[in-house]
Image (spheres, rainbow, N blue to C red):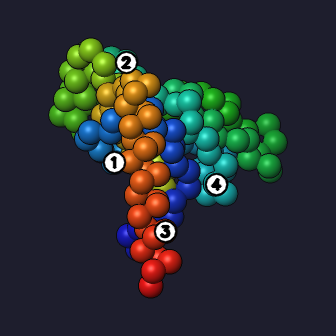
Amino acid sequence: MESGKKMVAQNRKASHDYFLEERFECGIVLTGTEIKSVRKGKVQLKESFISFINGEAFIKGMSISAYDFGNRFNHDETRERKLLLHRSEISKLSNKVKLKGYTIVPTCMYLKNGRAKIEIALAKGKDLHDKRQSEKERDAKREIEKAIKNNY
């Protein structure tokens, strides 16, 4: 991880369910109590996805827990939040999503120099046999590393 970055949340399920092809870093529009909860690490990306409305990108299904000291100013935990991307990136991604089988999923959320950033990826869904194959490869790699470690 680069200096100045602090990992807040990861979406491990995304790499299990999808082939992640192209990755983008984007900002996110948050309210005051939301950023305080993000800094505490109370973020869930598991079921979230990106959609495009009127040429703007929004993240839906992401849960940011309520801030403990937010009282009446607290935010809605699962509201859709606007993503900050360049217009060319938005048009490129929205055109790819129109192709069959492509979607855009968030892979991780982190703080970079005090600002909340989300890494999103252009993804294509895996079939069941693809998931099994990648699991076999991961297990084989783990066994090889274990054997190398035991021999030295």
Comparing labels 2 and 4, the label whose residue is closer to the camera: 4
Residue at 43% x, 44% y: name it.
136
Q: Front-most of 96 and 77? A: 96
Q: Secondary structure at mark 1?
A: strand
In the image, which disc is placed on residue 25? 1
**Residue type pointed to by label 4:** Gly
| Horizontal and vertical percent position of residue 19 | 33, 35
**Is residue 38 something that shows in the picture?**
yes
Q: Earlier in the sequence, mark 2 or mark 4?
A: 4
Q: What type is the residue that disc 1 sits on?
A: Glu
Q: Amino acid at mark 3?
A: Lys
Q: Residues within 10 Å of mark 2 (few under 14, many from 20)?
A: few
| N-terminal label among 1 and 4 | 1
Q: CA distance from mark 2 to mark 1?
A: 19 Å
Q: Give whichever of discs 2 and 1 has the lower sequence position.
A: 1
Give the numbered dot on residue 143.
Answer: none
Task: State left or right for residue 72 relative to residue 97.
Answer: right
Say which residue label 2 marks.
Answer: 53
Give x and y (percent) for residue 47. 56, 30
Question: Which residue does the numbered mark 4 point to in the structure image?
Answer: 41
Of the numbered discs in the image, which one, if any, rests on residue 146?
Answer: 3
